[in-house]
Amino acid sequence: MFRKILIANRGEIAVRVLRACHEMGIEAVAVYSEADRGSLHVQLADEAYPIGAAESRESYLSIEKIIGVARRAGCGALHPGYGFLAENPDLARACAEAGIVFIGPTPEAMERLGSKTAARHVAREAGVPTVPGTLDPIADEAAARNAAQEIGFPLLLKAVAGGGGKGMRVVERKAELEGAWRNAGSEALNAFGDGRLYMEKYLTSPRHIEIQVFGDNRGNVVYLGERECSLQRRHQKVIEEAPSPVVDAELRRAMGEASVRLARAAGYRNAGTAEFLVDEDGKFYFLEVNTRLQVEHPVTEAVTSLDLVKLQIRIAAGEELPFRQEDVTLRGHAMECRIYAEDPENQFFPSPGEILSLRLPEGPGIRNDVGVVSGWTVPGDYDPMLGKLIAWGADRAEAVARLARALDEYWVVGIKTNLGLFRRVLRDSEFLAGAIHTRWLDQWLASHESLVAGPPESEEQIVAALAVALWEAKSANGAAAAPATPRVDSRWKVESRVDQLDNKPRR
C-alpha cells in the first residue's frame, strides 16, 4: 500500500480523498493556489505545497507543477479527484514517467473512453446503442452546418473533452447554430484546454441514467447499480439519487452489462461511469464515459455500503476487486443535493464572498461532503460548489423526508446559496412522484421565477447575521476586538447579545 498520496485537486473532493487516505493510514499531500492558501483541504493535509496563482492554468491545470510537488514530497501515487486534470491522459502519462501511480484508468483507456467521440466508436463496436449524431469531432463551422442538416433540429453541441455541462449548447433552429458553435467551443477551450465539439440529436424529455463501473488489473469488471441524474439546470446535475425510481431489475441488468462490455472493450480499470439517456419507452442510448470518480459517487456508496475512494486506492495499489457481480446488492435509497454559492435571484450567478456562519445538518441518514468552513472566503476563480448534502433512507420517501429536514437545518450566512431552491423542489408533487426528465427543472424554474430564491431567512439567521454586523461595527469604532463569527448557541443568547450591543434593555 502507498505511504503518501498527492491529491491534485481542491475543495470538497480534495477533503473527501484526504479523509479516505487518513482512514487507511496513508499520508495525504495537498497542493493549493494563492486563492486556496487557507482552505480546508490545506488545513487537513499532512503536507501542503503552493503551485501558483489563482488562475487554474497557473495552478491546478499545470501538470509540470503538480508532478514536481509529487516528486518533491515523495508520493507513491496521485489521485486527481474530478474536474481539472482528472480525465487528462497527459497527467496519467506524466505520472508513469515519474514513477508515480495514477489512481485511475490507463492513459490509453482514457483516450478510448474519455474522449466522447472515441467512446461512441467503442460503443458501436461493443453493440451498445448510441444517440444519433457525429462519431468524430466536427472540423469547422461549415462541417457543423452539414451535420446539423443531416441530424435535424433540435440538436446538441457537446465538448469532446470534459463534462459538467461545460461546452454544451442546445440548438433549437438553424439560425442559432453559428452563435452556439462559437460559444460552446470557446467555453470548452477555457474549461478543458480542448475546444473540439461533436453533435448529437437532442432528445426532448429523456431521463439521464448512469452506471458506476469498477475494473481491476486482472480483467474483473463489475457494475454497482445506477444513479438517476435527470434533475439538471442547463445540463448541470443538481440532485442525484440511487437507485432510479424508474429502473427495474431487467433494465438495470441490461444497462449494467452494456457498461461492462464498454469497459472491457477499452481495457478499463479503476472507477468509471457510463452515462445513458433513457426514453419514455425504456430504451437506452449511450452518451459518454466519465473516466474518473463522479461528484455524485456518495449516493452509490450509501446504497452499496462501499467506499469507492478506498476501492480506487486499493485497485491502484494492485489489489483485486474484493467481490463479484453477484455480491453487489442495493439497499435503501439515497439522494444528493449539490450546494452552490450562487444567487437564484440573479440567474444563479456565482456568489463568492466570506461565509460568516455555517451550520451543517446532522441526524439519522445524513452525510455532508464539504470543503468550506465558517470564516472562509469563497473565491470567484473556481466552480462555486460548497459541498454536497446526502440523505439515505429505507426507501425513496424516507430519503426525501430526511433530505428535506436536513435542508431546513442547513444554515449559510454571508453569501447566497441554492438551498431555497432545493427546499421548494423537494415539495413539488411531480418530483415526489419521480416524474422528472432532463428538461424538467429548467421548465419548473421558468414557471416559478418568483420562487427560486426560496423562503426568506429564518429569524434565527437574521439575528445571527445582525449580531455579526454589530460586532464588526463596534470593532471598527474602536471597541474591543471580537470574533468575526460569534458562536451561536441558541436563539435567546444571540438576541441577548444583540440587545447588549445596542445597549438596549430586554423587554
Image (cartoon, helix red, strand yellow):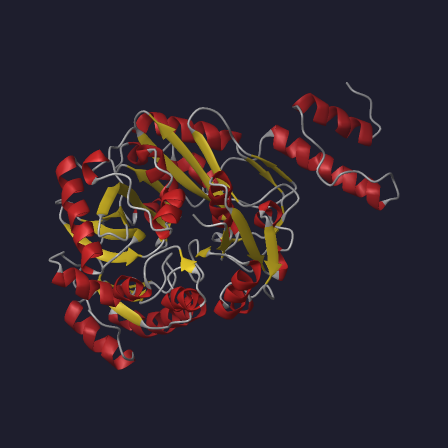
Q: Left or right: where does residue 503 sit relative to residue 118? A: right
Identify the residue at horizontal 44%, vertical 30% (top origin). 366
Q: Up-down: is 396 above or below 20? A: above
Q: Left or right: where does residue 236 sit relative to residue 273? A: right
Q: Nearer the viewer, residue 207 or 376?
A: 376
Relative image position of residue 478 (x, y in whole percent): 88, 43
Instruction: Tell me the quarter of the picture where residue 432 sits.
Output: top left
Identify the residue at horizontal 40%, vertical 48% (top origin). 313
Relative image position of residue 339 (x, y in whole percent): 48, 43
View extreme (right): residue: 478
Relative image position of residue 1 (x, y in whole percent): 43, 47
Q: Nearer the viewer, residue 129 or 33?
A: 33
Image quadrant in which the C terminus is located: top right
Query: Is any part of residue 25 visible from this angle?
Result: yes
Identify the residue at horizontal 24%, vertical 67% (top origin). 117
Number of numbered callouts drawn: 0
Q: Left or right: where does residue 372 sit relative to residue 449? A: right
Q: Up-down: is 334 above or below 450? A: above
Query: Is any part of residue 203 visible from this angle?
Result: no
Q: Left or right: where does residue 411 sit relative to residue 159? A: right
Relative image position of residue 235 (x, y in whole percent): 34, 54
Q: Up-down: is 94 above or below 303? A: below
